[in-house]
Amino acid sequence: MAETDSGRGGAAVVAAAVPSAERELAQHLVALHGRLQLREAELAARVASYCAENEHALRDVEQELESGLAALEAAMATAHVALLPENVAAANIVSVKGRLDDAMRLNARSCLVRGDPSLK
């Protein structure tokens, strides 16, 4: 009968320890949840920052490409006029070609530099 009493006593100790263990576990889970929420907020802020940086960089590229396109269109218009039959004799074809080459190089470099930091 002593075994039965000691068995019941052990069960009582375990039963008394369960609420304490549950409370500790719940507190630990709440603490972990809080840490996860903080980390989530940090990561969300980083993502927002990266998005803003990329948006700014894309706007810069867009502006560079727009100005480069305008320069290319102007160079093409100059080349077109220079190649008209009545202008060919007086036109400086080397200069016109140089202007076209410069406009093309500028546009290509804008795209490449943005895509590959080693080209800056």
Image (spheres, helix red, strand yellow):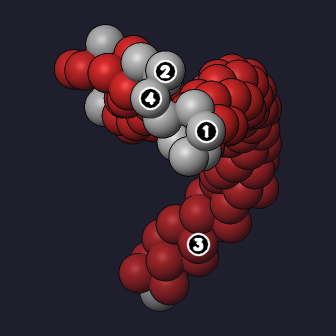
Front-most of residues 89 and 101: 89
Q: CA distance from mark 2 to mark 1?
A: 8 Å
Is residue 113 depicted above or below 14 in this figure? above
Q: Quadrant of the C terminus?
A: top left
Amino acid type at mark 4: Ala
Label 3 Cα neighbours within 10 Å, binned few <14 / some 14-19 / many ≥20: few
The amino acid type of the residue labelled 1 equals: Glu
At label 2, which amino acid type do we have?
A: Ala
Q: Are marks 4 and 2 in contact (CB under 8 Å)?
A: yes
Residue visible at 59% across and 45% down in the picture: 84
Q: From the viewer's perspective, tell me whether residue 79 is left or right of residue 98.
A: right
Give the x, y percent position of residue 101.
36, 29
In what element is the residue under mark 3?
helix
Q: Quadrant of residue 39?
A: top right
Residue 90's disc number: 2
Per the image, label 1 sits on a secondary structure element best described as loop
Q: Position of residue 2 (x, y in %)?
A: 44, 77
Please tell me whether mark 2 sits on a helix, a strand or a loop: loop
Amino acid type of the residue tagged 3 in the rendering? Ala
Which residue appears at 50% of the width and 84% of the height? 4
Question: Does the CB distance between marks 1 and 3 fall below 8 Å?
Answer: no
Q: Which residue matches tag 1?
A: 86
Q: CA distance from mark 4 to mark 3?
A: 110 Å
Disc 4 versus disc 2: distance between alpha carbons?
4 Å
Depth check: give the residue in front, 5 or 97: 97
> Which circle, 2 or 3, is nearer the viewer?
2
Q: Nearer the viewer, mark 4 or mark 3?
A: 4
Residues at marks 1 and 3, CA–CA distance in whole angstroms: 110 Å
Q: Which residue is mark 4?
A: 89
Secondary structure, mark 4, is loop
In the picture shown, does residue 115 fall above or below 11? above
* Residue that numbered label 3 is attached to: 11
